[in-house]
Amino acid sequence: MSAARILVVEDEASLAQVLVDNLEAEGYDVRVARDGEAAETAWNGGAWNGATPDLVVLDVMLPRVDGYELCRRMRDAGHDTAVLYLSARGEPEDRVRGLRAGGDDYLPKPFHLPEFLLRVQALLRRRGWGATQAPEAFEYRFAGHRVDYRAWTAELDDGRREPLGERELGIFRALAERAGEVVSRDEILDRVWGNDAFPSSRTVDNFVVRLRRLFEPDPSKPIYFHTVWGVGYRFTPEGEEQP
């Protein structure tokens, strides 16, 4: 199997070189872009003879096009590449803005290199499906709803279009890919958060509540996202009332 392709978008030359050296030491195929416009070209296949990167390490404060805008453009264009933001702006509102723009993870500067490499591994593990799936696998339809995995949106049966965050989309996909089966909270945590993160199982419950608010006719009486007490959840796309 060929090495994972990683695009490092960083205008600070010394930091870019540190990232490249460490990523290449891990066996990745790495390219660098120093501003937003060069990054857009590389992201669209200009750095690997038409192939797109598997992961983009994206600085936020860039010349020409900032990281948030660049990520938003790429998501709008249909790119599902995993995105790890690096930024000196580490306030909660900055993280939220980055995730809403389509990012997957956010690591404030300065950061610890081993943590950075672990996050890279986790993102590649969790998002590796994107480049090899057939086009129809980029969306899921049920009960008049359409979930677009590439645009990170839900088109609801009443015509509304709602954005989905990384965790909401990850949990939805984990359940939808095993529709009709019980998926444990631990499986969801491992799939969506990865082995290097330690949220509680209650965190999963909170995100399922959000999915119910979006998709269920009556969130207090779910027919699609069922709780299996003491275990996890079961997704029933055709709808089924719980006894």
Image (spheres, rainbow, N blue to C red):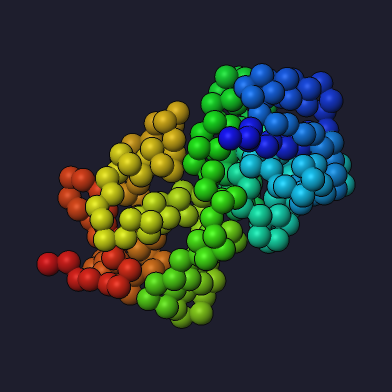
Please say if 223 is above or below 66. Answer: below
Q: Residue furthest bottom?
A: 158
- Position in image of residue 147 (x %, y %): 49, 66
- The answer to whether residue 227 is left or right of residue 83 is left
Q: Residue at x 26, y 61 (%)?
A: 180
- The answer to whether residue 75 is left or right of residue 164 is right
Nearest the camera: 243 or 137? Answer: 137
Q: Can residue 98 be seen by looking at this rendering?
A: yes
- Position in image of residue 133 (x %, y %): 54, 55
The quarter of the picture where the N terminus appears is top right
Q: Report the number of numbered marks.
A: 0
- The answer to whether residue 20 is left or right of residue 2 is right
Q: Residue at x 12, y 67 (%)?
A: 243
Instruction: Give the quarter of the image for residue 239.
Output: bottom left
- Position in image of residue 98 (x %, y %): 64, 46
Q: Residue at x 64, y 24 (%)?
A: 27
Please say if 145 is above or below 183. Answer: below
Instruction: Give the quarter of the image for residue 105.
Output: top right
Please say if 152 is above or below 121. Answer: below
Instruction: Give the quarter of the image for residue 238.
Output: bottom left
